[in-house]
Image (cartoon, grey):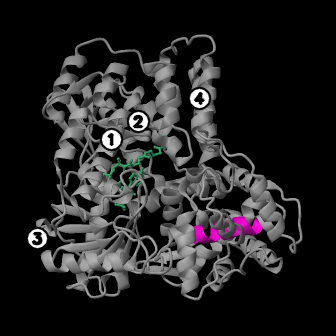
């Protein structure tokens, strides 16, 4: 870390260089205080430019320090020191000025930025609120309404919008350093603006805070920080600066130690680690400049859109002309939907569609870098596709299957150059869902595996490596969730009670509502295949519903009844009668919501540990990412393993043992027991080991 001071005539340029993102470590805070003192003492300096080296302005507090006791100088004091400096400081912003970075900029007398810069207070995404004046200075500068928007959403704004809001004083065209120095020379001659801390907060209309609270509560789901941020802004509007700062700091410190903040920090670092697994460091991925998708159904079309959104030209191959037309129509419909939702412009949709070539001719793939198969989940059909691809594609082209349940080793068997084959399991809708399970086969070459991760980065997805087993990581845990949900029905719970318990836990939908939405037939198909393999999947009620063709919303009924044209689930007498018959021999009981959630979530944890034990996942945090990004596990609980750590691994093991004695769950697996004994799961490059991990 370095902070250097250079002179450009009467302007001092303070350059922060603390890679990778100039985070405000203790050393940087200290160096900034020293720079202020040095420049205060220099009568030749008329103004100061604060600028950063590398890819961004200060991106915030150093999140890795949050688990430790705060060390002085504390950031609010650093910001105050800059605000009280004898000469005006000008923050010169490129990249992102986030969190503590923006708070430092708010301490400066002026802020200028290049057009591509973004500015924001994303603290709520980490389960905290700004802790260095963000909720106190921002409403004084841009008014409470805009401040509430920025702080409670955590979303950054671009430089143009920041200028409109009054958050920055100028957008700099051309070189930032030169422009900022010119700006500083100019303002050095003018009277100083009043420091933000001494300004009053503009008044709000009657009822503003109440309606903001309703809105923020609805959006925050179960996260605590957004509402706390709102209270802090409101407090800052109703008390003086010093009291408001004290209130903000107290709230910040309280949240910093909360379990939600710990969980969200865990997710933050897991998401950043996922795209670059240590076991692939030094492996160069193959180039992917063109792509093709075989199969234009829902998944194939979504994948094609994801590839186009990332700028790759795409060929869509289908078996005949009519299927090609249907596939292209599916793709067009997704782009049209994106235009309607305001995600892209009409022109962008036209341009992206123009980059898709539909054909039934595999010959078009002779020079394609990456082909993703997304045809019907039938092993024979998929094998035929790969035989054809083996004939036409370059030997170094990467070939991938999007299977969600079949064994990629079997799918690829017989394809030529099996080292270029792997599974890429997208989640529906593939252009929206962030998760990508990357499944190497026994023969996948390291650079092909690395290509899967590079593709994920290109598509903006969260990649997780998964080993081969029924359902990989995500769907394997989903099977346990569903089986547990049915077990509960046989012991006195109703579908609506189970769904309500899981919503209360933080899932967007309960397991029965979710099955009715997605359709019960796919899981029935998988159970049939499992039975053919000699397994005995547990789904007594679902099997009977499927036998009656109650496949969910699409067939007018599943776990619930639906009135035509209405998706509101209604308790079903038919389902209740089946449950009563199936549960005749089981002891019935009254369930509290928390017990219902435990009975589903703790077996998920156990399955996750089993997945680690078998090496199907390499890192506990990977499983957390799978459940958060593919299955709606609440982010503020950090994923199943992080949640288990929060509950205490010993407690989890004890509860699972009790459930297993009652016949309500499997006994805890060996790895989970060992983790409970040794204090946690920890990860080393290449795999998970047991130890005193965090
Ligand atoms: C805060 O400021 C609280 C204050 O209000 C109060 C204080 C009193 N700390 O994302 P990338 C690492 S809360 C530590 O891949 P990009 C990251 O782990 C903070 N490390 O880069 C990764 O490490 P590695 C509010 C951080 O170019 C590397 O940097 N600020 C931090 O795609 C590259 O990260 C935020 O929440 C950090 N704050 O995107 C900003 N940030 O190379 C969070 C990043 O070892 N950061 N790292 O894997 C971001 O949004 C993005 O990193 C950013 C760059 C947009 C800046």
Element class at badge 3: loop
Q: Nearer the viewer, mark 2 or mark 3?
A: 3
Q: Could you say which disc has been placed on residue 366 in the image?
A: 3
Residue at 65 percent of width and 63 percent of height: 548
Quadrant in which the N terminus is drawn: bottom left
Residue at 58 percent of width and 73 percent of height: 608
The residue nearer to you, when weighing 368 against 668, is 368
- Measured in 3D between alpha carbons, the distance from the residue under mark 3 to the one under mark 1, in whole angstroms, is 42 Å
**Residue 21 x, y percent position in the rendering:** 33, 50
Are there few (<14), some (14-19), or many (20+) residues within 10 Å of tag 1? Answer: many
Instruction: Name the residue beneath numbered marker 2.
Output: 120
Are there few (<14), some (14-19), or many (20+) residues within 10 Å of tag 4? Answer: few
For residue 260, above or below residue 140: below
Sequence-first disc among 4 and 1: 1
Sequence-first disc among 2 and 1: 1
Instruction: Name the residue beneath numbered marker 1.
Output: 96
Residue at 16 percent of width and 61 percent of height: 290
Q: Nearer the viewer, mark 4 or mark 1?
A: 4
For residue 52, above or below residue 662: above
């Amino acid at each position: 870390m370095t902070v250097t001071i250079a002179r450009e005539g009467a302007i001092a340029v303070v350059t922060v260089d603390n890679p990778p993102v100039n985070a405000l470590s203790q050393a940087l805070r200290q160096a900034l205080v020293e720079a202020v003192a040095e420049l205060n003492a220099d009568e030749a300096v008329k103004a100061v430019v604060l600028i950063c080296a590398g890819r961004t302005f200060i991106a915030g507090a150093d999140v890795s320090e949050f688990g430790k006791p705060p060390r002085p100088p504390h950031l609010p004091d650093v910001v105050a020191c800059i605000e009280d400096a004898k000469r005006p400081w000008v923050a010169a912003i490129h990249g992102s000025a986030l969190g503590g970075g923006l708070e430092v900029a708010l301490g400066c007398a002026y802020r200028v930025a290049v057009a591509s810069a973004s500015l924001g207070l994303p603290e709520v995404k980490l389960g905290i609120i700004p802790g260095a004046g963000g909720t106190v200075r921002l409403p004084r500068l841009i008014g409470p309404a805009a401040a509430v928007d920025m702080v409670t959403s955590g979303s950054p704004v671009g430089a143009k919008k920041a200028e409109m809001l009054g958050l920055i004083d100028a957008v700099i065209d051309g070189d930032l350093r030169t422009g900022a120095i010119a700006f500083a020379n100019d303002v050095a001659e003018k009277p100083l603006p009043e420091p933000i801390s001494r300004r009053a907060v503009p008044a709000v209309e009657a009822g503003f805070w109440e309606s903001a609270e309703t809105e923020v509560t609805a959006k925050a789901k179960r996260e605590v920080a957004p509402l706390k941020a709102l209270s802090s802004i409101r407090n800052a509007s109703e008390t003086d600066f010093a009291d408001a700062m004290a209130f903000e700091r107290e709230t910040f410190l309280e949240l910093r130690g909360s379990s939600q903040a710990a969980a969200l920090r865990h997710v933050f670092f897991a998401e950043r680690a996922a795209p670059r697994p240590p076991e692939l460091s030094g492996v160069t991925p193959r180039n992917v400049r063109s792509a093709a998708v075989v199969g234009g159904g829902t998944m194939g079309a979504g994948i094609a859109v994801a590839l186009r959104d990332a700028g790759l030209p795409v060929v869509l191959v289908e078996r005949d002309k009519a299927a090609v037309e249907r596939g292209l129509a599916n793709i067009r419909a997704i782009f049209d939907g994106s235009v309607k939702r305001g995600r892209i412009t009409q022109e962008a949709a036209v341009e992206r569609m123009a980059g898709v070539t539909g054909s039934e001719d595999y010959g078009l793939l002779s020079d394609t870098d990456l082909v993703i198969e997304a045809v019907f989940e039938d092993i024979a059909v998929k094998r035929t596709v790969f035989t054809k691809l083996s004939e036409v594609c370059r030997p170094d082209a990467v070939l991938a299957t999007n299977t969600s349940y079949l064994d990629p080793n079997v799918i690829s068997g017989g394809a030529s150059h099996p080292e270029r084959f792997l599974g890429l399991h997208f989640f529906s809708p593939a252009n929206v869902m962030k998760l990508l399970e990357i499944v190497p086969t026994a023969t996948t070459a390291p650079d092909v595996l690395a290509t899967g991760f590079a593709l994920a980065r290109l598509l903006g997805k969260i990649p997780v490596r998964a080993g081969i087993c029924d359902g990989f990581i995500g769907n394997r845990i989903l099977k346990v969730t569903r089986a547990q949900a049915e077990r509960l029905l046989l012991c006195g719970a109703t579908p609506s009670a189970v769904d309500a318990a899981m919503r209360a836990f933080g899932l967007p939908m309960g397991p029965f509502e979710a099955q009715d939405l997605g359709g019960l037939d796919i899981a029935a198909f998988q159970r049939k295949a499992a039975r053919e393999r000699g397994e005995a999947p547990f789904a007594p009620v679902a099997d009977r519903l499927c036998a009656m063709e109650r496949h969910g919303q699409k067939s007018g009924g599943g776990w619930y009844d639906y009135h035509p044209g209405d998706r509101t689930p209604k308790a079903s007498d038919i389902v209740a009668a089946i449950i009563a018959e199936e549960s005749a021999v089981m002891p019935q009981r009254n369930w509290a919501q928390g017990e219902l959630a435990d009975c589903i979530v703790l077996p998920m944890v156990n399955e996750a540990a089993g997945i680690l034990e078998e090496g199907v996942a390499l890192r506990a945090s990977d499983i957390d990412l799978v459940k958060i990004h593919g299955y709606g596990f609440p982010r503020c609980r950090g994923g199943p393993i992080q949640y288990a750590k929060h509950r205490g691994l010993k407690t989890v093991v004890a509860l699972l043992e009790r459930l297993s004695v009652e016949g309500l769950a499997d006994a805890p697996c060996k790895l989970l027991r060992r983790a409970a004994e040794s204090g946690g799961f920890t990860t080393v490059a290449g795999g998970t080991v047991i130890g005193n991990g965090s």
